[in-house]
Image (cartoon, rainbow, N blue to C red):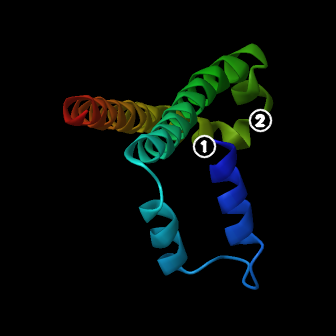
Amino acid sequence: MGKIIVRVINLIQGTKFLPSINEYYAFLDSLTILEESCVFHIIIFMTLTFCVINIMGALFANELIKFFKLESRFPSLAIFFYLRLKFQRYYLIYSVSTMLFFSIVGLFMNLLILATG
């Protein structure tokens, strides 16, 4: 794992701020299948964590609005609060479906790696 971090740091320390896409391909080609699966898992878990934080933020924001009675304190923002509640269902559906999709893809990739040895 330390070798991977050193390789990434060496890529970033080049003359360019962001390496070209060919350097990323060369870096990914140099990894073993286990290291590639580790990178894949890191990306999946970061996405899942982001979705969970978004869901928690959406749900706890409602509690904060109710606790501080923001609708009555700021009537000019009441329309915004109403629209937020109206679209919250779609936002939550999107976040949950994203989490399910990445979980299924991650499970499929794990089974594929397990089957190939």
Near-viewer residue (53 or 43): 43
Task: Report helix, strand or loop for mark 1.
Answer: helix
Near-viewer residue (91 or 116): 116
Chain-order first, disc 1 or disc 2:
2
Q: Is residue 7 left or right of residue 73?
A: left
Q: Quadrant of the C terminus?
A: top left
The CA span between labels 1 and 2 is 10 Å
Residue annotated with mark 2: 74
Q: Is residue 109 left or right of residue 88?
A: left
Snapshot quadrant of residue 70: top right
Which kind of residue does numbered mark 2 sit on?
A: Phe
Residue 32, relative to residue 93: is it above or below? below
Where does residue 1 sit, x and y in percent of width and height? 63, 41
Where does residue 69 sit, x and y in percent of width and height? 75, 20
Residue 67, relative to residue 24: is it above or below? above
For image coordinates 63% across by 29% down, the residue present is 57
Snapshot quadrant of residue 92: top left
Q: Report how many numbered discs are placed on residues in the image.
A: 2
The dot on residue 47 is none
Residue annotated with mark 1: 80
For image coordinates 50% across by 77% down, the residue present is 21
